[in-house]
Each structure stands twice: as C-alpha cells, then as structure tokens.
C-alpha cells in the first residue's frame, strides 16, 4: 500500500477529545486505504486530468518508451536489426505491461490515429501489443551508441509533432535516449510523455510537455 500514517503526540483532555481524535484517525486510515487501493488497481495509470483532456482533444503526440526488457544495456554484440533473436527484447512482464497500456487507452476511449515505432523489435512489439498495429519509422531509431542521425531525427520528429492537427493522437514508440533527444524528457521503460508541438515567430519548432502517463 502506498502512503503512510503519521501519528502526532498531543495531550488529550477529555473523553470527547479522544473520541474526536479517534474519528479523525479512522477517517485518515480509510482515506489511506482507498488511495492505496486505487494506486494498486490493474491497468490504472498516473495521468492527471490535463493529460487525459489533451489526449481527447488531440493534436498531440504520445512518446512511449518501449516496455521492460530482459536485463542488459543496448543490444548484444553482433546484433542485427532485421533479426529479433539477436536483440534485447521484451520480457514476460514487459509484454503484459504493454497490453495494459492499450487497455488504459481503451478505457479512456482514446483511439490513436497513428502508431509508429522504431524498427527495433522491442519497440515494435510494444506498439503492437498495446495497440494492435504499428508502422516502422526510421526517425524513431535508437540513438544509444548511435549518435550519427540524432540531429536529422530530432528535426523530423519535432516537425511531425508540430504538424499534428486537432483530433490527431500519434503514438510514437521509441527508446530512452531518443525520446530524451526529441523532447528533453527521460522516461522509464513503459512510461510515456504527452507533448504538443508549435512554431515560434521565427518558425522554430518548440515542444510543450503536457504530462506523463505511467500505467501500472
């Protein structure tokens, strides 16, 4: 259970005051239990009202880091992009969690208009397990140990986000290092950040972070 109960030592002068304190303590305990139950609910998410409202209005991108993988950093030596068995892939919990992400979107009645992913199998699997469809996009490539295309990819992704129209909800499944380069946010595996793009007076693309989604 999340949360805690803090007991403050105060003088109690009468049975009435003890009764009032007891009622307050019971109410606090009940509230803590309710919060804990809500946080433990299946396929729930930490996402505030502003995030949900922005998703329903559209014109936003959801940058989702691929879900949990087997232990490791990067990919094994000699890995090949076209051969999933050579890469670091989702573990069983990562696959189950990706499905819970999709469940959360469906419960919120939010249907992505576009689902794109990097060509790495862990990103593609996350997208397909969550949303049942996906499209490879080279601009979402993993930049970890691969900084060469960073400038080009950042420009492409930001322009795409800024070009989204009202009603559009684009889910872009990528990697921690890549999402950090795109929007300046570093996410845990299976976590998402919701952003909206715009252009300033000089035409430069800016990205506004609306909030995060962390499905449990």
Image (cartoon, rainbow, N blue to C red):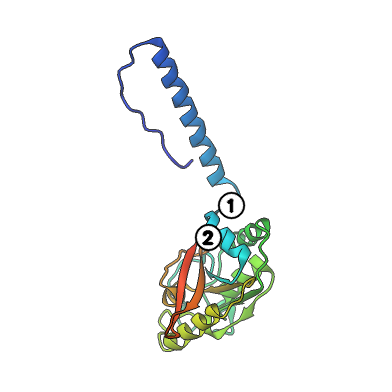
- Work out whether 216 lies above or below 23: below
| Residue 141 appearing in the image | no
Is 126 situated left or right of 177 in this image?
Answer: right
Provide the residue designation for mark 1: 44
| Residue 128 appearing in the image | yes
Q: Quadrant of residue 122?
A: bottom right
Q: Secondary structure at mark 1?
A: loop
Q: Residue at x 48, y 25 (%)?
A: 26
Q: Residue at x 55, y 81 (%)?
A: 160
Quadrant holding the C terminus: bottom right
How many numbered markers are drawn?
2
Q: How far apart are the alpha carbons under marks 2 and 1?
A: 10 Å
Residue reaching furthest to the front: 201
Q: Which mark is residue 156?
A: none
Q: Secondary structure at mark 2?
A: strand
Q: Residue at x 45, y 66 (%)?
A: 187
Q: Residues within 10 Å of mark 2 (few under 14, many from 20)?
A: many
Query: Residue 75: image x %, image y %?
Result: 47, 77
Query: Residue 164: image x %, image y %?
Result: 59, 77
Provide the residue designation for mark 2: 213
Q: Quadrant of residue 185?
A: bottom left
Residue reaching furthest to the top: 15
- Work out whether 28 lies above or below 63: above
- Work out whether 88 lies above or below 11: below
Q: Residues within 10 Å of mark 1 (few under 14, many from 20)?
A: some
Earlier-in-chain disc, 2 versus 1: 1
* Residues marked 2 and 1 touching at CB (< 8 Å): no
Is 10 situated left or right of 158 in this image?
Answer: left
> Viewer-proximal residue, 28 or 176?
28
Query: Residue 135: image x %, image y %?
Result: 64, 80
């Amino acid at each position: 259970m999340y949360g805690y109960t803090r007991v403050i030592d105060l003088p109690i002068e009468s049975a009435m005051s003890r009764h009032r304190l007891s009622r307050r303590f019971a109410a606090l305990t009940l509230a803590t239990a309710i919060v804990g139950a809500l946080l433990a609910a299946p396929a729930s998410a930490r996402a505030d009202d502003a995030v949900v409202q922005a998703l329903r209005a559209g014109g936003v991108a959801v940058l989702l880091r691929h879900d949990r993988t087997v232990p490791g950093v990067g990919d094994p030596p000699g890995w090949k992009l076209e051969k999933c068995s050579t890469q670091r892939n989702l573990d069983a919990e990562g696959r189950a969690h990706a499905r819970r992400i999709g469940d959360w979107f469906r419960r919120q009645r939010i249907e992505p208009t576009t689902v794109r992913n990097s060509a790495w199998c862990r990103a593609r699997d996350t997208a397909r397990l969550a949303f049942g469809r996906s499209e490879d996009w080279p601009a979402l490539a993993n930049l970890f140990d691969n900084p060469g295309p960073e400038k080009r990819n950042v420009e492409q992704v930001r322009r795409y986000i800024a070009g989204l129209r009202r009603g559009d909800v684009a889910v872009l499944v990528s990697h921690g290092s890549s999402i950090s380069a795109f929007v300046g946010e570093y996410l845990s595996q299976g976590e998402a950040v919701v952003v909206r793009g715009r252009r300033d007076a000089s035409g430069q693309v800016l990205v506004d972070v609306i909030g995060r989604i962390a499905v449990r």
